[in-house]
Amino acid sequence: MFKSLVERLRNDKPKGPSPNEIKREEERREFNNLLSIAKKILASDSPNKIYEYIYTLGKAKQHQLIVNCFRKHMISKEEVWNEENLFFLRKKRSLLFRRFDVSGNNLLNLTSVREDIRIAEKRLNPKDTLIFPLTWNGKRMLDNLLKIGKRVDHPWSFDKLNHNILYIKPINIGVVENGNHSMAVNIINNESSDVRVDEILDLSIIYEDIYTDGIHFRKKETDTIIDEVDNLEMAAIFEIGRLIQENGLYYGT
């Protein structure tokens, strides 16, 4: 009887948070720390320093994309298909940054670089701007690494027929849509700052619809979960873009 009572008391003892709950809470704290620093930068006398902060936060993800290509040799294109893969786990393939009008024929937030002269004249320098190559083929990556660069007397150069770059504002990052493996070599070597933009994706309309708490991406209107965060730093960059927009700050201003 005494044993039964002890067992009952043990079972009635309040249970603490699970390891997963502890991990999630720590991630949420770290996410909030990153945003807190961003707010301090934007409130300082040098708000443009926010772009250096974004560069620092996203550098590991940039390197991870290239290293994974070497490690896995071949990556499913679905894993690195477009810009959403930088932020989401993409459990729901329908979740896209590119938004269409009600007719479904016209994109609302993707424009040709010709429509923004400031960005049309812009050149992305891998030394101070995040350019994400969505590399997927290890053999191509190795071939380009061996054949391109000043050390092999074949300096990297921008090829307008091969390289296609999407510029995402207001977070000031580029995503390679074509010529991924050769662009990755330029990122590795930091050889050329002559990386030109072809298209502009504006996240403003996305910020009206979704947000992230560092754990999930959620619908603003209903607070329902859309997808899981894939990378804490990239989730922070996403929300820092919202802060940049609220402060009326854009790269180059």
Image: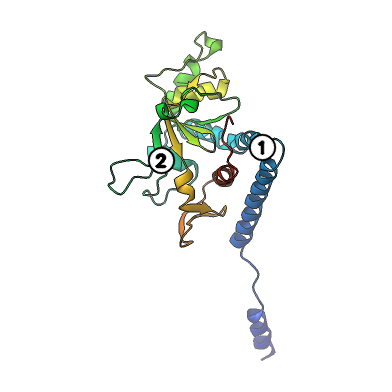
- Find residue 109 and name its label: 2
Kind of residue indicated by mark 2:
Asn
| Residue 231 percent across, percent down from the top left | 55, 45
Kind of residue indicated by mark 1:
Pro
- Residue situated in front as seen by the camera: 207 or 161: 207
| Residue 77 percent across, percent down from the top left | 38, 37
- Find residue 47 and name its label: 1
Q: Classify the position of the N terminus by image quarter.
A: bottom right
In the image, 231: left or right of 117?
right
Q: Classify the position of the C terminus by image quarter.
A: top right
| Residue 191 percent across, percent down from the top left | 56, 17
| Residue 160 percent across, percent down from the top left | 40, 19
Q: Secondary structure at mark 2?
A: loop
Residue 56, picture quadrant:
top right
Mark pair 1, 2: CA separation = 25 Å
Disc 2 crowd, CA 10 A, few/some/many (<14, 14-19, 20+): some
Residue 89 in sight here = no
Q: Secondary structure at mark 1?
A: helix
- Find residue 13 and name its label: none
Depicted 212 relative to depicted 40: above or below: below
Residue at 56% x, 47% y is 239
The residue at the far right in this view is: 45
Residue at 38% x, 41% y is 78
